[in-house]
Image (spheres, grey):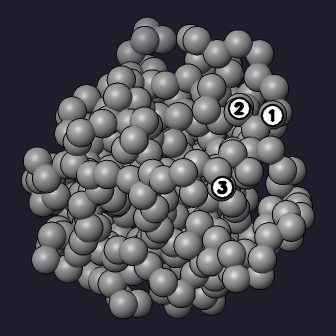
Amino acid sequence: MSRSNRNNRAWRYVYSGVRETDAVAVVLPEGSAGPNPGYDSDGQHSDSDSEPEFHLPPSIPTALPVTGESYCDCVSQNDTRYCRSMRSFHRMKDCHCGEEDEYFEWMWDDSTKSSATLLSCDNREVNFHMDYSCGTAAVRGDKEMSEGQHFWEIKMTSPVYGTDMMVGIGTTDVKLDKFRHTFCSLLGKDENSWGLSYTGVLHHKGAKSHFSTRFGQGSIIGIHLDTWHGVLTFFKNRKCIGMAATKLQNKKFFPMVCSTAARSSMKVIRSCFSPTSLQYLCCLRLQQLVPEHIDKLEVLPLPPGLKRMLRNQLGWVLSMNQESSGSEAANNSSGSDSDSSSTADAETCQRKRCRWT
């Protein structure tokens, strides 16, 4: 058999395995205590000489949950354990790290969601495919984003695996239940939406481009939609990972998430809004000038009442880290057509390459 035929059969085998694990929670053979032999801990094929002649690049979906990408160091997030009684991977206990906010500008819309979703936690957490999965489910937020500054964070509260689990934005033209019997990357499938996959791939108009490293259970994905400048920016674990799109002015979007994985879930832990005012622009500039580890408001000689007001209304701007981590910066610069050598200053994120305009 020729090498090309062998490789084609191998790829079909890989993708068929991912589809099967979408249908039910990730299952290992009885008596197994961890990933199958021949896989690294991150779910990719190992480089052993005894393995087949193909290897999975980082952007390929994995049948095993992504680990080691959590925002915090909680054992339940970084160690996705195998439960013998349930014959599946699951979270051992809830983690509330990073969930400091008490007021939310929007939540998930119970009237605009796929049939295979269930909302909980005051409609902030969405659970996909409660029993088994036969396709792609999605949900959108209950507030339209047409003007001002919008920032929200989505926390992965379950094992992350399968064909795709995505966060992003879309217009009212996105049909959330269209692919309920098809495993696919729903967000970014056409010109009406942009989606970031857990594999680190950015989707729009059916095109794909490597954007960041993968994210998994416990990861916090932040999205900043600046309708004034028409810019969409993504964050991972509160570090900027790049600008995804520009020229989004005069359009109306909704926050969206989707998943093909059985018993998967995501939670809104922050949703904020601010008009594009002089106050906002001053806080943004202050955030860029003062080092990350310093409390911006504490170093300024401001009246206590003004400090309290700024912290309550624009605290999310002051805490938004515009600097990329070293690994993310390396990934983005290596995959970019327009980046120059990056520097770790406050404008790094704003200079990131824009995938689509």
Q: Amino acid at mark 2?
A: Thr
Q: Nearer the viewer, residue 152 or 44?
A: 152
Residue 193, given in percent of the width and then of the height, sits at 26, 42
Q: Amino acid at mark 1?
A: Asp
Distance between the Cα atoms at labels 1 and 3?
A: 17 Å
> Label 2's element?
loop
Left or right of 208 on screen, residue 278: right
> Label 3's element?
helix
Residue 349, given in percent of the width and then of the height, sits at 65, 35
Residue 59, given in percent of the width and then of the height, sits at 52, 36
Q: Nearer the viewer, residue 152 or 289?
A: 289
Left or right of 314 on screen, residue 176: left
Q: Nearer the viewer, mark 1 or mark 3?
A: 3
Q: Which residue is mark 1?
A: 345
The reply to whether dot 1 and dot 3 touch (C-beta < 8 Å) is no
Q: Earlier in the sequence, mark 1 or mark 3?
A: 3
Residue 99, given in percent of the width and then of the height, sits at 61, 80
Q: Which residue is mark 2?
A: 348
| Picture residue at 70% right of the left edge, 82% below the top | 305
Distance between the Cα atoms at labels 1 and 2?
A: 6 Å
Above/below status of 296 relative to 284: below
| Picture residue at 39% right of the left edge, 74% below the top | 105
Q: What is the total number of numbered labels drawn onto the structure image?
A: 3
| Picture residue at 20% right of the left edge, 34% below the top | 190
Above/below status of 176 relative to 248: below
Residue 8: which quarter of the image?
top left
In the drawing, what numbered circle is on residue 283? 3
Q: Amino acid at mark 3?
A: Cys
Q: Nearer the viewer, mark 2 or mark 3?
A: 3
